[in-house]
Image (cartoon, rainbow, N blue to C red):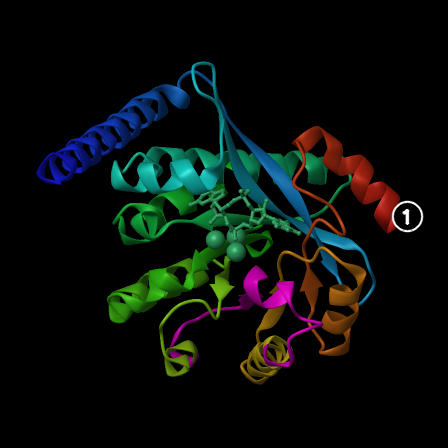
Amino acid sequence: AKDEGKNTFRMFCEELTRSSRERINLIHALQHALDRNELCLHYQPKIDNANGKVTGVEALLRWTSPEVGSIPPDRFIPLAEESRLIIPIGEWVVRTACSQQVAWKRAGCDLSMAVNISAVQLKSPELIQTIQRIIEETGIEPEQLELELTESCLVDRPDEVIKVLEKLRALRCSIAIDDFGTGYSSLSYLKNFPVTVLKIDRSFVKDLTSSSSDRAIAQSVVNLANNLDMVTVAEGVEHQHQQAVLEEIGCNFVQGFLHCEPVPPEEIPDIVRARNGE
Ligand code: C2E
Ligand code: CA
Ligand code: CA
Ligand code: CA
């Protein structure tokens, strides 16, 4: 029995070194991902429930490493945050997304552009200047740039966060709270944050038609947003029955596989033309 304990402990240590070695290898590979052009953005259309048209897209980061293959963002974004590589990577994301928005617009495809911003970026003192510079360099209309921040970004040091958000609003960018309802914060902070969009998390959309409590939560988010002059976006809409409920409760915009999955940039103009009938 004593040996068994030892063995378990040894296996535990080996497991631990293996996983930390894997993490270190991934961080190392990520350091070169930008220079080696291994990162790209896919874009997921956002549909206006008022008319069924595509009015915007969300940029979603993709990484394919020649050594490791394709690595999902849920796996590499946390490592990029830990290593602070998210600062240069996040800057690349905003610049690439804004240039793409302007290129589409010149080609007659006018869409708003939503970009995910990590808590590490939000806390970086350079964020405001970086965004301002990218707006100037790319020529994007700042009103068409929407910054998605998770609720968890906002709870820690709210007074400082409010100042940053106010500066972003002064640049005329939109601000969305991503994964709304999944954080641990109180609702009272919402009225103090200059936020324009609430994104209803996929976890509430999933059982929207079978769970009366999830439907009540989604309805409450829509009512709250309406009362605070914000708009709502539901994410992760996969089925027509979810879409029907979202329309019924007055959700403004939808995103999800039902309408379109995230696609490479070259596919967007045809999708928009087909859907918007232009
Ligand atoms: P998120 O911001 O909540 O993005 C939505 C995720 O749901 C995306 O996963 C998208 O592909 C997926 N999705 C969209 N529609 C559906 C659907 O109908 N059903 C299901 N099951 N999933 C759907 P993805 O692209 O794997 O990204 C995962 C997360 O990684 C994002 O969650 C976001 O938090 C983060 N992320 C992605 N790109 C960036 C980025 O450029 N910067 C930062 N900081 N984070 C990013
Ligand atoms: Ca998002
Ligand atoms: Ca989400
Ligand atoms: Ca998320």
User: Does the image show residue 201?
Assistant: no
Q: Exactly how many numbered labels are in the figure?
A: 1
User: In the rendered structure, does residue 251 fall within the stretch colored magenta?
Assistant: no
Q: Which residues are magenta?
A: 191-213
Residue at position x 38%, y 66% from top? Answer: 166
Residue at position x 45%, y 63% from top? Answer: 169
Query: Please, what secondary structure does the residue beneath circle 1 have?
Result: loop
Q: Amino acid at mark 1?
A: Gly
* Residue 227 sits in quarter: bottom right
The answer to whether 270 is drawn above or below residue 54 in the figure is above
Residue 181 in percent (x, y) is at 48, 71
Residue 149 in percent (x, y) is at 43, 57
Residue 161 in percent (x, y) is at 31, 64
Query: Considering depth in this image, is 145 or 222 the residue closer to the camera?
Result: 222
The quarter of the image holding the N terminus is: top left
Q: Is mark 1 within 8 Å of ligand 1?
A: no
The answer to whether 187 is drawn above or below residue 266 in the figure is below
Residue at position x 71%, y 55% from top? Answer: 238
- Left/right placement of residue 166 relative to residue 104 reads left
Query: Considering depth in this image, is 103 or 32 the residue closer to the camera?
Result: 32
The residue under label 1 is: 277
User: Does the image show residue 12?
Assistant: yes
Residue at position x 71%, y 78% from top? Answer: 249
- Left/right placement of residue 228 relative to residue 157 reads right
- Outermost residue, front direction? 1
The answer to whether 78 is drawn above or below residue 63 in the figure is below
Within 10 Å of disc 1 (Cα), the crowding (few <14, some 14-19, many 20+) is few
- Outermost residue, left direction? 2
The quarter of the image holding the C terminus is: top right
